[in-house]
Amino acid sequence: MDGKDLSDPINKAFLKDPANVKANENTLLPSDIKASGYAAIFYAGGHGTMWDLPGDLELARIGGEVYDQGGIVAAVCHGPAGLVNIKLANGKLLVDGKDVSAFTNDEEKAVKIDKEVPFLLVDKLNSLGAKHHRAGNFKKKVVVSERLITGQNPASATGVGEEMVKLLAPVAASSR
């Protein structure tokens, strides 16, 4: 949730449910997370993630462990900043050789924040061996590369979620 825009029906419904609010107020620290208990991890976007996620080695650890155990790693918009330090058990970076999408350099320029972010996300991902795919500015783009799902911008968030559900369906079916 970005802010408390109650004109957004999803935000409004979330905030009206006391169980959602309570769960959000009592989250675990990344260091307390055992990846073995999860089939997927999702790195949400927002410009703040450009500063917060790349240096959080605990979140990177969780992502790597989830992927190594056959799980799904997903991110949207600036959330792929959380992917830049994910190393797999084989020592390789998760994004190396993968097709990805993320908030583009042109989109950064369009919102006039390209000089403020610590790095341009597309450039960083490409420098790590990822192959970036894009749509036009602020258009939907979702890329699935094995069990890595990425989306270009907020317009892509629903599509990322839908792709996660598709990949999680066999996991859910086997746990019944």
Image (cartoon, grey):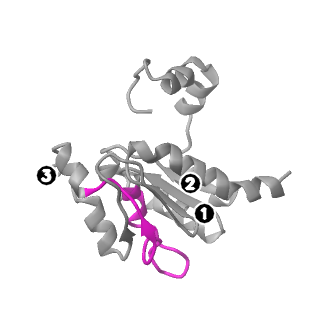
Segment tinted magenta in the rendering = 80-104
Q: Residue at x 41, y 23 (%)?
A: 4
Which residue lies under the disc numbered 3?
A: 115
Tell me which amino acid carries mark 2.
Answer: Ile
Q: Where is 87 relative to 81, above or below?
A: below
Could you say where residue 171 lies in the image, as x and y percent from the top left?
A: 75, 58
Q: Earlier in the sequence, mark 2 or mark 3?
A: 2
- Marks 2/1 in contact by CB < 8 Å: the verdict is yes
Asked if the stretch drawn in magenta spans residue 92, the answer is yes
Which residue is at the front of the view, 141 or 115? 141
Please name the predominant secondary structure of the magenta segment in the image: loop
Residue 72: percent from the left, percent from the top? 60, 61
Q: Is residue 33 visible?
A: no
Q: Amino acid at mark 1?
A: Val
Nearer to us of marks 3 and 1 is: 3
- Marks 3/1: CA distance? 33 Å
Give the residue at mark 2.
Answer: 41
Instruction: Please say whether residue 65 is visible from this viewpoint.
Output: yes
* C-beta proximity under 8 Å, tags 2 and 3: no
Residue visible at 82% across and 58% down? 174
The N terminus is located in which quarter? Answer: top left
* Amino acid beneath label 3: Lys
